[in-house]
Amino acid sequence: MTAVYNFNAGPSALPKEVLERAQTELTNFNGTGMSVMELSHRSKEYEAVHQNAIDLLKELYNIPDQYKVLFLQGGASLQFSMLPLQYLKEGKIGNYILTGSWSEKALKEAKLIGETAIGGSTKEGNYTSIPNVADLQFNDQDAYVHLTSNNTIYGTQWKDFPTISHAPLIADMSSDILSRPINIEQFGLIYAGAQKNLGPSGVTVAIIREDLLEENVDHVPTILRYQTHADSNSLYHTPPTFSIYMLNQVLTWVKEQGGVQAIEKRNEEKAKLIYDGIDESNGFYKGHAEQNARSLMNITFNLPTEDDNKKFLAKAKELGFVGLNGHRSVGGCRASTYNAVPLEACEALREYMDSFRLQN
């Protein structure tokens, strides 16, 4: 099989143009006679790639001057610990809003470090929705308020974020960063593993407001301080150079597509195809997420029986669809329609959904 429809939840699809560009440069980057993977991270050739990636992200997301862009390692999972290590000090509370497995994992790590609270949760409803912003609970002692913007397992997504002033709002945006415009100034810190919308695994992007770098963090190991990486332009130690090179290529591709606004429009079009296939199936397909909480990135659904799910997935695999199995927490099916998934793949999935329903 030479081509597939890649709906993997992560690592996920990369733009074909990006892969082809990387292929042409793989053994001789920019006339150096070496792969970018072989270059010193202190070389002017690599530093140009590194800085261009920072500049492009600032441009695409309209990131204000009072924010720093950092390239970190350890995935979003390391951020679950790195964040409370900096800010969850004695007398302060880490306020976590639970909307799925990843927010639960972030809370679990924070509990190892300091006092926490749950400011909102939809766990009782098996995470089919997002909490109402008006119902969220805050504390004067909040060190920060943490949420996960998109939930890959359950297929839900925040449409509007809470505006708070008593503490910084922190967001794990690993699975929907750069999929739609956002107001960066609502947040003190945004972090995201790259392997959904930004590039391959290996690099984590953090966008942090400068006043949060002024905290006294003498108790935190040097490499786990945001200030360390901000001071060194994310070159304190050897960065994941190839992942950042690919990130730069993906950001270039987003700009070529017309920027984040154009990407959002296409993402809405892709998701609508599949959600319409669910809604127009007379109950044959049943979505997990409530309609007002549906994710544009991860579309989760079940068929009438588990046997139907297995049959649907087996036939899909034969037809070249990859990554449609739902997470074990929800079961059924999941189509991850990240930025690089082409419209044609979603059209093909919709056609298959319709034909499978009519035949069964």
Image: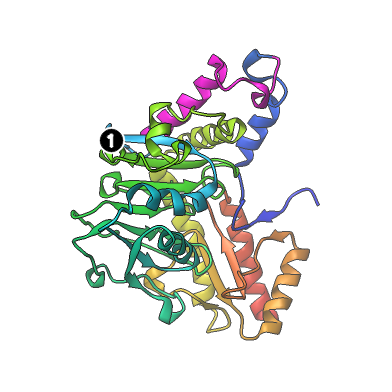
As drawn, is 108 to the left or to the right of 135? Answer: right
Task: Report helix, strand or loop for mark 1.
Answer: loop
| 51 magenta-colored | yes
- Residue 251 x %, y %: 49, 36
| Foreground of the two, 101 or 80 | 80
Which residue is nearer to you in this view: 327 or 71?
71
From this viewpoint, is residue 199 visible? yes
- Percent x, y for residue 245? 57, 30
Residue 7 image offset from top left, x and y in percent: 62, 58
The residue under the point 46% across, 68% down is: 100
Which quarter of the rendered picture does the C terminus lie within?
A: bottom right
Mark 1 residue type: Pro
Identify the residue at horizontal 45%, vertical 54% (top origin): 80
Q: Give, as a single range, the part of the protein colored magenta.
A: 33-58
Residue at x-position 25% and y-position 39%? 211
State whether the magenta stretch is mostly helix, strand or loop: helix
Using residue 192 as the reference point, say whether residue 8 is left or right of it.
right
Q: Where is mark 1, residue-wise?
A: 64
Q: Quadrant of residue 241?
A: top right
